[in-house]
Structures are given as C-alpha cells and as structure tokens.
Amino acid sequence: MLSKIFDDLSGFISGEKFNNDLQEFMKELKWDCFSLAFIGIGSLIFGTTAVSGFMKLGERQQRRLRFSIYNSLLNKDFQWLDGKGDINGKLVLINRCIEEYRSGVSEVSAIFLKNVLTVISLTVTSFIFSWRLTLISMTTVPFITLFSLILMSLISKYTIKENEYSSELTQLLDWNLNSYEWIKIIGGRYKEAEKFAKISENSTKSFMRQRLYSSLNIGLMKTLAFLMFIETLWFGSFLTKHNYNSSGDVFACFYACLSITTIISGLTGLVAQLKKSSIALNTTFEFIDDGRNNKKKRDKGIVDKNSIRLVLRDINSYVSFENGNIKFDNITFHYPTRPDTIILKNVSIDILANQTTFILGKSGSGKSTIASLLLKLYDYNSEKLHNSGFITIDRYDISHLTIEQLTDNITLVEQKTSLFNGSIKENLLLGSDYKLEEDISHDEFINKILEITILTGFIDSLADGMDTIIGNDSGIFLSGGQQQRIAIARALIRDTPILILDEATSALDTILKEKINKSIREWRNGKTTIVITHDYFLVDDDDFLYFMKEGQVVESGYKKNLLLNDNSIFKKMSSFSYNKDKGLVSKRNSKYNGVFDSIYGEPLNYRSSAMVSNDVLSKRLSTLSTNLLSLMIDLNNTEEELGASNENTEYNIEGNEDVIQYQKKEEDKEGKGKEIKEDLLPVRVLLYKFRSLITSKWSIIFGLIATVLTNVCNPIFSYTFSKLINGVVPTSSGYASNSYMIQWSFTVIGIIIADGIFTVLSSYLLGYGAEKMVFAIRQKSFNRILIQNIIWFSKCKPSETIALIVNDARDLRCIVYDYLTVFVGLTILTSMGAIWSLIIGWKLALVGLSFIPLFIIAGIFYSIMMKTSEDQYKTKISNLENYLHETVTGIRTINYLNIKQVFIDRFNEKLVQVSVIGDSRAFKIGIE
C-alpha cells in the first residue's frame, strides 16, 4: 500500500498518472485511505488476539510452574529441607523467577514472535520490489548479529550474578525477620546491617555491569540499523536513475528495510528478556529437581525371616497399630547435615504398649531425634552416614512403611507449634475426620478436649468463638502457650493410637503444665503416649522413663524404683529440681512467662528446669537486662524516627491470656471497624517521595540531558533524512546531484552516531541513578526493620516484606530509566513535532492534532482499567506467595498431620483465583 500511495502521489505530481485530473486522483486516494483503515482494524483484531493468547499461555505456564514448585516442596524429605536451611529466602527468588518466566512466555514471546514474522514478511516483500536493494541493505546484518551475541553473553553472565546476590539478600532478610528475638538479644543489629550492605553492594555492581553492556547493545544496534538507511538510499538513488526500479519500488523496499532494522534493534532487548526468562526457568527447574531422588526407594516385598519383624508387601495398604508397642533396636544415627556428629549411639528403647512413657534429658541429648526417627523423617539405615539399627511398631518394620502410613497412626506435637491462617476451628480440625462444615460447638468429644487443654474459657471469651480468625491476616495473635494448647487439642482430636508430646507444654507455667498433662494422661488411658521433656516433676511414680545423655540411654526404669537407688543418675539430676510445692513460679506471676517466651522461645521455668543452675540463671538474667535496655533504646529510636503512635491504630492486650490483637481500623458511622485500603500512588508522586533517596542526582541529571539530546536528534534526523529522500524522487529537472547526496549523507551519519552515543549515556546514567536509589531504599528499609519493636515483627509477613525489598525494589528501577525516558521522549517529540508540522503546513497539522483529545481519553480510560486489573492481580499473587511461605513455615506440622492434600487443594483454589484475574488482565493488555 505504501508503494502504491507513493507512486500515485509522484505520478500525479509529475503528470505521468491521472492526466492532472484532481478528482480522479482524490478518488483513488480515498480508496487508498480506506485500505489503510481496514489494515489498521485487522491489525488491532489480530494483534489483540495474538497478545491475549500469549498472555493466557503465560498464565497457564505460571500456574503449572507454581503448582510444580508447591507439590515438589511438599514431597521433599526432611534431609533435603534441613540441608537447605533458609527455604523461604530461596522461594522469594523462585517467585521472582516465575514472574520473569511468565513475562517471557507471554508479553515478550508474543512481541518477539510477531516481530520475527514481520521481519520475514517484510524481507519477502522487499525482495519482491527490489532484490538488489534488499541484498545491499542486509550487508550490516552479520555485524549486528555478531555484536549482539557478544554483548548478550556478557549481559547473561551478570544477570546470573545479580540473581545470586538477590538470593543471598532474601536469605539474610528471612533470617532477620524470623529470628529477630535472637538478633536483639545478642546485639547483632550492626553486624547484620553490615552484611546486608555488603551483599547489596555486590548486587549493585553486578547490575551496573549488566546495565553497561545492555546500554552498549541498545546504542550499537540502533546506530548500525540507521546507518543501513544511508546505503539503502544511496543505492536506491542509483537504481532509480538507471531505471532499474521506480521511486515507489525503492520506497517500498526502503520502508520494509527501515521497519526490519527498527524491529531488529528492538529484538535485542527482547532477546535479553528471553535469555533472562530462560535463566529464571532453569533456576526454577533446579529447585524442583533438587532433592527429587533423595527419597529412598522402598522395598515392597521383602520379609526378614531371621527376626520377628514383619514387612508389608503393599506400601499403599492401610496399617493399623492395634497395640502401639514400639521398639528401637540398637539405633546409631547421624544427621545428614552433621555427618561427623553422632546423635544417637546404640540406642535401644522399648515403649510399652497402651501406657505413658517418658523420655528425659537436657537439650542436645538426642531425645527429640527419637520422635523424628519414629516418623521416618530421616533415613536411619543410611550406609553413607554409617547409620544402623531397626525400629518396629507392633512388629512392623517401619523402614518398609510410608510416612503417610505412620502419620495415620502417630501424632507428634513439638515445642514449636505451627498454626495456620484461618479460624480456630479450622486449626483444631486439621488432620481429623471432622468436616469443616460440621457444627462442633455442641460436640461432646470436642468440648471435652477443650476442657482438657483449658481452652473453653478462652474461646468463649472471643466474640466469634471458634470461628475467630487467627494469623497475620486478621490481626489476632496468640501467645506461645495458647498456640501449644491448640496444637495439643488438635492432636487429641485426631485420637491416633500413638501420641508423642515433645516439650509440648514448654510455654506454659507449672500449674497449667501439671493440670494439662494429668488430664491428657487420664484421657489417653489405654493408649500409647510418649512424653519427651526435661520437666522431671511431670513424671509420676508409676511411670516408666528413659534418661538420655549425649545420645545414649544412660538409665531406664520406673520412677519409684530409680528414686530408691542412691546411684541413680535420674535421682541425682531430679534433686536439683525445686520442690513442686515450693516452686518460684506461681499462678500469680505466671503472666510474666510471656516475656521470657517472647525472647528465648522457651520460658525460664525455675521450678521445672533442673538443668539451670543459679550461676547460669544469673548470667541469663543479666544478659536479658542488658539487651532489654538496648531494645528499649531501639524502640525509643523507632518512636522518634518512625512515629510510634497512630490515632487510627488500636492495641488490645488481654493480660490473662496474653493475647495481642493488632488491627488498623477506621470507625464508620455505625462504629464498626473496617480495614483501611491504601490507594496506589501515581508514578510522579512516587518519584517525588523517593527524591531524597536518589543519592546520585548528577547521574540522573546528565542522564536526562542525554535523553533530551537523544529525542532532539529524532526530528533533526527526520528533517535531514527527508533531504536524502529528495535525491531519490524525480523532479522536473531530474535527480539530485552526487554532491547533494554526499553532503546530506554525512550530515545524517553524524546525527546517527550522536544519537547512538546519547542513547548509551541516557540508558546507563539513568540506570546507574536508579540502582543507587534502589540501594538506598534497601539500606534504609533494612535499617528500619532492625529497630522495629516486637509488635511490628509479630504482625509482619516475612515473604511479603522480602518480596517488597528484593523483588519490587528491582522493579522500582523502571520508574527512573523507563518512565523518565518515555515521559521526556513523549514530551519532546510531541512538542517539536507539533511545532514543526504547524510551520510546514498548519492546515494538515490541525487535522492531525484534532485526534489528540481522542488519544488522551482512550489513554485515561485504559490507564484506569489497567490500574484496577494490576492491583487485583498483584494482590492475588501476593496472597499466593504468602500461602507458600506459610506452608514452608509449617511444613513439619503438615507432614505430621498427613494433611498435604488439604494444603494442595487450598493452593489450587488460590491458583484458580490468580488465573481468573490473569485471563481478564490478558485481554486488557492485548488491546493496548
């Protein structure tokens, strides 16, 4: 169409067509305009369909990838989980990689494929009009490809390095957000800030190297592409002069080559993003595949004829332990993460069926490992680690049972319990046969268990009772003791043949410990119960106990018999314990246990901690006082710097139950609270707010100057290039002279080179300033985190906070070097274009300018539509990632309760919500 229109125009001017009949010319031109309009409508329809389709494909791939990550995580064994340490920190990087892959599959792939097909079609079109000119114009393509490949390899290298440093940042942030109590106790604030600054600095250096090569790539490709125009016009002028081709053919070929070079120039950036997506996908696959082969293949049909141990032939069959007689036979065990440390050494234990058995010992004695091995969370037969021994339950060798078969019959409650976001009822019924829809408020079985765990009064005091929401999303938080009681109640509701309580009441005061343990003992009468503790006073005279020390069973027997033996180790150790009738902890001062609980993770129970001597106790209290003073200073600084009081913030602290409720509310006319929703800030407001954090202002200023010069070069290039075009168009006096072509060719070449240099400077300097701003934001954010108080940490969402500081901060760079570049470019080109067009032909210019209001209205409407869609999409993704973080935090509990499928179903529900919003967003982006 361009060739036809140009031939019509040049033919009418030269008098070779239409016989100087204006009406005939206008009639032909009208059909040409209609043709262009139909082409535009078709481009809109097919373009929207293509981009929307690819966006939906990206959403589908993201959904499959996120599910694969989640499913892989739930099925990894504990040896892998322990070996990886900070899983949440790694997952923040994985979430970032998934988003980069989604973008690569959807928007980038759609544009890339469209551009590739356009290049192919334009190349064919160009060959049709003038194969000679097409071959000449493509002589620069090998150089463009060579330089692009070299620079892309360097960009890829430093992109990988930046991702590695980002992973280190996430791990450090996760450690500080989840271990804040310990950091405040040891005074590690400045050390952590120093480590964070060092990693951030390395990340910044990697990005700046990546930005340098990316800027060179953009500038060099742009320069080479535009230089191709010169040779194309020169040779085109030669072809028209010697009648090889018409002016229309030359311009059709020239326009095709111009479009090809423009697209190729843009393809370099797309290839960089696709390379980034490829790296992201490989990182994700490495996480999915890592540890996949760690699980030992189970033998389905071996029977040990030399012992009484029985082996199931079908590992999928249901196993029921009727008696619950447990035997550890000569177990020697090393953890995979500590292969040189013997945790258990030749341990043999017989847990009597249908009785309560105690395993005692101080921290590090190996008593908790007993519970982990009983659930087969670790391979206790690993020859590589020199582990050995056998474990049987009712004569079944558990090495041939699945973890699911074991957790169906065994419930483990650990000291550090995991409750999940949701209602108290949902947490109580997890892993049980009760359905969530059932009304359990009048269930005798449930009510009895609530009485056993002393939860009845607490739940009755809540306005919503068992439907009360707990967790970060609601603002209602429970003390450590309340969490432990709910976890115990959950275990009792499961009512499995075997129950293991591993320091399950450590956060409770002595009176509650005794009362709950006594009630559990009565409730579990006739069932196998194992109590792992260092509280000697919980053992009754008729209870059988094993005393462990340094990974060995040093003594066993009934308590009443051991106390009669003067040489008994248990008797000597228990003598250090305070008499339970003269204990220092009373009901009156038990509420202060929450202070110790919040700092140490385990209360200082003077009466029950026989292993704590007076000297150690005084040192702990001295350390506590010193660090509490430091913490108070930090909190005071927090109040001064951040403003601790907020008139819209209310704190409700119930002393008896030690429940801290935090909710940010605003009162409506009826007096009911509702959550405040923050409005999204416009980009210009964000830039204004972040102005103080732009530490490298001169790089931004010079970058903006380079951006202005780059955009000024565009209209100058258009003007000088039009002079070259005149050399191709025949006039009444013939074609332009060679001197004319040389003069304007060198002028255009100078402008092209200047434009390339300014493009490199603009991209690099704005990127440098943006990265310095991100570095400052990260430093200030982390330093403020370090001085926050306990309440802030209790309501903080680690995964969301890490994503904001690491991932979203990276996206913030786009505000500087993308938004400013587009804004400045649009302002300059629009103003200069309007002025120039008015000078040359004001009538035609006014016709074009009349469309500006239409563009503005369409732009505003689209902006509002996309803002809503992006907000909803971001919220759903954030909820999904928070749920992933919650799963990692409680993954041990999920395995203990055998509720993987419950969490998979909930995760799928959240994925569906993301997909619905994602499909709507895909269509809106497609019509852009």
Image (spheres, rainbow, N blue to C red):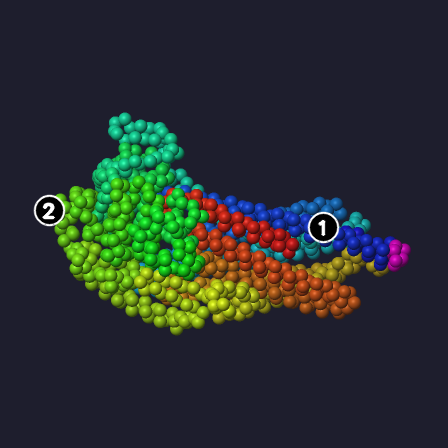
Find residue 796 and report its image quarter: bottom left
Nearer the N terminus, badge 1 or badge 2?
1
Residue 148 vs residue 575: left or right?
Answer: right
Q: What residue lies at 34% left-to-right and 47% top-to-bottom?
A: 445
Looking at the picture, does residue 536 appear above or below residue 681? above
Task: State the residue in front, 742 or 239.
Answer: 239
Residue 562 position in % (x across, y down): 13, 45
Magenta span dominant secondary structure: helix
Q: What element carries label 2?
A: helix
Residue 325 position in % (x across, y down): 26, 37
Q: Which mark is residue 329?
A: none
Q: What residue lies at 79% left-to-right and 67% top-to-bottom?
A: 843
Task: State the residue in front, 456 or 249.
Answer: 456
Number of numbered labels in the structure image: 2
Asked if residue 241 shows in the view, the reply is no
Residue 102 position in % (x across, y down): 54, 50
Which numbered disc, 1 or 2, marks the residue closer to the eye?
A: 2
Q: Residue 42 carries which label?
A: 1
Find residue 336 and report its image quarter: top left
Q: What residue lies at 48% left-to-right and 64% top-to-bottom?
A: 674
Q: What element carries label 1?
A: helix
Q: Distance between the residues labelled 1 and 2?
A: 96 Å
Farthest residue in the left direction? 566
Residue tagged 2: 564
Q: In which quarter of the image is the C terminus?
A: bottom right
Asked if residue 402 shows in the view, the reply is yes
Q: What residue lies at 77% left-to-right and 60% top-to-bottom?
A: 726
Amino acid found under the numbered disc labelled 2: Leu
**Magenta region: which residues?**
18-25
